[in-house]
Image (tube, rainbow, N blue to C red):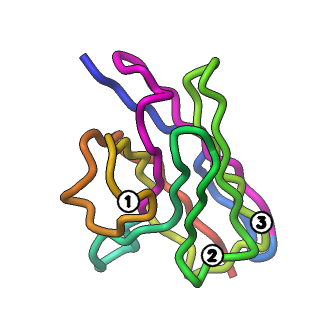
Amino acid sequence: QVQLVESGGGLAPAGGSLRLSCAASGLTLSSYGMGWFRQPPGKEREFVSAISWDAGSLAYTDPVNGRFTISRDNAKNTVLLQMNSLKPEDTAVYYCAAKYGGRVGDPDGGKWNYWGRGTQVTVSS
């Protein structure tokens, strides 16, 4: 059974930092592209960032480019999202996702194979 479990969310001040972690089990992580999506309150889920199976390709949505950094450690079955210079508009539930094949930065959530349950990130102004 595939499981993706997010952690590291919480409350941060504007300008602060948080680091999200996604622990994967039940799949060979090195075979999957990994990504992060978020769903702000009252809005639809949106793509945030993605990383190819070998970390050779990265993708970011424009609002987080330059502030967020995605990375992965296949040996530890872990994907990280370092979030710096946080803004109140980054407030959302953040989801980890896995995708087999295809485009790394595909923003279409329907094309991602597995999802975590999410972790809440709240940025205060």
User: Which residue position holds label 3?
Assistant: 84
- Mark 3 and mark 2 in contact (Cβ < 8 Å)? no
3D distance between C-alphas at marks 1 and 3: 26 Å
Residue at 55 percent of width and 51 percent of height: 51
Is 27 colored magenta in this rendering? yes
- The N terminus, quarter of image: top left
Instruction: Say the numbered circle drawn on residue 64.
Output: 2
> Looking at the picture, how far across and down is residue 71, in whole percent?
67, 45
Numbered label attached to residue 103: 1
Q: Amino acid at mark 2?
A: Val
Left or right: 87 in relation to 99: right
Circle 1 Cα neighbour tier, 10 Å, few/some/many (<14 / 14–19 / ≥20): few
Cβ atoms at labels 1 and 2 below 8 Å apart: no
Taking depth in this image into account, of 80 and 53 the one nearest to the observer is: 53
At horizontal 38% and vertical 59% (from top left) the residue drawn is: 103
Q: Residue at x 67, y 79 (%)?
A: 87
Residue 2 sits above or below residue 117 on the image: above
Q: Nearer the viewer, mark 1 or mark 3?
A: 1
Measured as percent of width and height from the top left, residue 22 is found at 53, 36
Name of the residue lying farthest toward the left: 110
In this rendering, the answer to whether 121 lies above or below 60 is above
Circle 2: element type: helix
